Amino acid sequence: METSAPDKGPVLQAALLTGDATAEDIETVRLRTSVYVYEAPVRIWHWINALAILVLIISGYFIGAPPPSMQIAEATEQFVFGYIRFAHFAAGMVLTVGFFGRIYWAFAGNHHARQMFVLPLTNRHWWREVLFELRWYLFLEPAPKKYVGHNPLAQIAMFFFMTLGISFMIVTGWALYAEGAGQGSLPDSIFGWVLGLVQNSQRLHTLHHLGMWAIVIFMIIHIYAAIREDIMSRQSMVSTMISGHRTFKDDRAD
Ligand code: HEM
Ligand code: HEM
C-alpha cells in the first residue's frame, strides 16, 4: 500500500503502524485540505453573541408577555420581573460591547472578518452564486460548491439579520433604556432622539419586539443551515466556528 502523498511525504505513519488507519484513511488525507478562516476574536464573539441573544430573546419575550408573578408571592416578597429585566439589560450590554468589538475586528482582522459588513453588490458573479445557493438550499441543484468564508446567501442573511438587525436592536433597546434612565442620563443623551423619531414609547416597544421575531427567524434558519451544510456540503461548518479551520472534504477544483 502507498502510504506517502506526493507533496506531503509519508502520512499517518503512527496510526498505520498501530493498525488505527486504513488504506481509505490514507487516501482521504491526500484529498483533504483546510484553510484558516475565522480568527479567535470572530469565534469568541460568535458564541458570546449567540448566548447573549438567547438570553435577550427569553427575557425580552417575558418583558413583552409578563408571567403572572403575583401567584408566587406578594409583590413586596418577590422580584421576578426585576430579575428578568436585569438579565435583559445585562445581556443587552454584553451584546452592545461585543458588537463594537466585532466592528473593531472587521478593521483589524483578516479578509473574512469583513464579510458580514460589506456585500459586493456590483459583482455579478457574486449574484450568480447567491442564486446558485438559493437553488442548492431548495434542493434544486444536485451538488454543492465550495466557499471559503460565508456562502453568498449566508452573507446576505448575516448582513441584514445580524449586522443591521443587531444595530437596530441596540439602538431601539438603548432608546427604551434611556426612558427608564431619565432625561439628561448618558443613554438619553445618546439615544433619546429615537423616541422623538418614532413618536411614542408603545411604538418603540413594538418595533423592538418585532426585531426580536426577525432574529428568531434568522436563528432557526441559521442553525438548520449550519447543521445541514455540515452534513451535505463539501466542507466543514460547525467545527469551523469552533477551531477556525475550514476543511474541504475533497480536492475537486470548485
Ligand atoms: C447552535 C447554534 C449555532 C451554530 C451551530 C452556529 C454555527 C455557525 C457557523 C458554522 C457559522 C459559520 C457559517 C459560515 O461559515 O458561513 C456561523 C456564523 C455566524 N453565526 Fe452562528 N451558529 C449558532 C448560533 C448562532 C446564533 C444564535 C446567532 C445569532 C442569532 C448566530 C449568528 C452568527 C453570525 C452573525 C455569524 C457570522 C459570523 C461572522 O462573520 O463574524 N449564530 N454560525
Ligand atoms: C437581540 C437583541 C434583543 C432582543 C431580541 C430584545 C428583545 C426585547 C423584547 C421582546 C422586549 C419587549 C418589548 C415589548 O413587547 O414591550 C424588550 C424590551 C426591552 N429591551 Fe430588548 N432586546 C434586545 C436588545 C436590547 C438591548 C441591546 C437593550 C439595551 C440595553 C435592550 C433594552 C430593552 C429595554 C429597556 C426594554 C424595555 C423594558 C421594559 O419595558 O421593562 N434590549 N427587548
Image (tube, helix red, strand yellow):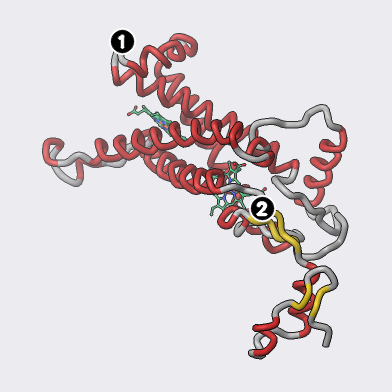
Q: Give SS at disc 2.
A: strand
Task: Say what amino acid the circle numbered 2 marks.
Answer: Tyr
Disc 1: residue Cβ within 8 A of ligand 2's nearest atom: no
Quadrant of the image occupied by residue 10:
bottom right
Which numbered circle lies on residue 200? none
Q: Where 154 sits versus 236, above or below? A: above
200 sits left or right of 250 in the view: left
Which numbered circle lies on residue 184? 1
Q: Residue at x 19, y 46 (%)?
A: 72
Quadrant of the image occupied by residue 201:
top left
The crowding category of the residue bearing disc 2, from other C-alpha atoms within 10 Å (few below 14, some 14 to 19, many at least 20), is: some
Q: Residue at x 80, y 51 (%)?
A: 136
Give the total number of marks visible in the rendering: 2
Q: Nearer the viewer, mark 2 or mark 1?
A: 2
The crowding category of the residue bearing disc 1, from other C-alpha atoms within 10 Å (few below 14, some 14 to 19, many at least 20), is: few
194 sits left or right of 233 in the view: left
Q: CA distance from mark 2 to mark 1?
A: 47 Å
Q: Where 168 sits versus 84, above or below? A: above
Query: Residue 64: where, in percent of width, then height?
Result: 39, 33
Disc 2: residue Cβ within 8 A of ligand 1's nearest atom: no
Q: Residue at x 83, y 88 (%)?
A: 1
Which numbered circle lies on residue 36? 2
Which badge, 2 or 1, is on the more N-terminal residue? 2
Query: Residue 115: where, in percent of width, then height?
Result: 68, 37
Query: Residue 7: where, in percent of width, then height?
Result: 82, 68
Quadrant into which the C terminus falls: bottom right
Q: Where 179 sits versus 140, above or below? A: above
Query: Residue 205: where, in percent of width, then height?
Result: 43, 24
11 sits left or right of 211 in the view: right
Task: Say what amino acid the circle numbered 1 marks.
Answer: Gly
Quadrant of the image occupied by residue 77:
top left
